Amino acid sequence: MAPVSGKYCAGFSLLELVMAMIVVSVAAVALLGGFGQITTVLSTEANLRGAGEVAQECGEFIIATKRAGVTGYASVSSTVCDGLPVPAGFNRTVTVNTITPPPGPGGRIECPASAVDCKEVIVNVTSPGAAVAEVRLLLTDY
């Protein structure tokens, strides 16, 4: 077979191949950057979901002990959820504020007049350095 010469040569030149490789590599970098961002978002979402579950578990534990007749809300303290497990990487704090019925309608939180004991319980779950989830409960004994 004789070599083809002249104006109409078949195939791609080296310059065209290099340009095609550059275009493909730029597109690949853009796609991989997007995948990296998706991974970060999924990790953050999993962290938020886990923190919410830890906070909700403590809140439900407090309500369940009252429903079981074990204790009233008068004995709820900041150590009420210490026996519950906390996954690695999370910290849980429980703040209990005893609330007296305010004299008028301008109070922060109003408790029913017939309540024997009224408490605000705040369950805060943090992950390294940031507040992630919070559950607030208003508990009253009648």
Image: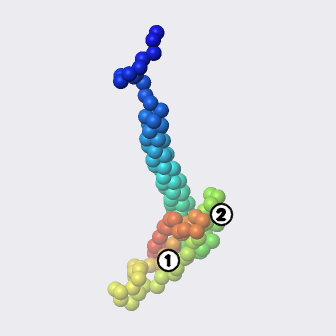
x and y percentages locating residue 45 in the rendered image: 49, 55
What number is the disc on residue 71?
none
Q: Residue at x 62, y 57 (%)?
A: 87
Q: Amino acid at mark 2?
A: Gly
| Lower sequence index among marks 1 and 2 | 2
The amino acid type found where label 1 is placed reads Lys
Q: Residue at x 47, y 70 (%)?
A: 136
- In the image, residue 52 sits, relative to residue 36, either above or below, namely below
**Residue at x 64% of width, y 58% of height:** 88
Q: Residues within 10 Å of mark 2 (few under 14, many from 20)?
A: few
Coloring scheme used: rainbow
Q: Position of residue 77 (x, y in %)?
A: 59, 74
- Of residues 70 and 137, the one drawn nearer to the viewer in this rendering: 137
| Residue 62 in view here | no
Tell me which residue sits at (41%, 83%) in the image.
108
> Which quadrant of the figure has residue 6?
top left
Q: Is residue 14 above or below residue 114?
A: above
Picture quarter containing residue 101?
A: bottom left
Q: CA distance from mark 1 to mark 2?
A: 21 Å
Residue 119, disc: 1
Identify the residue at the far front of this view.
6
Whether tag 1 and tag 2 are in contact, CB under 8 A, the answer is no
**Local crowd size for mark 1, using a 10 Å CA cut-off: few (<14), some (14–19), many (≥20):** many
Left or right: residue 46 versus residue 113 is right
Q: Secondary structure at mark 1?
A: strand
Q: Give the structural element (helix, strand or loop) at label 2.
A: loop
Q: Which residue is mark 2?
A: 83
Instruction: Give the vertical position of 104 relative to 39 (above or below).
Output: below
Of 106 and 111, the residue lying toward us: 106
Left or right of 24 in this view: 65? right
Query: Residue 113, position in %: x, y?
Result: 40, 82
In the rendered image, residue 141, in percent from the top left (x then y), is placed at 48, 74
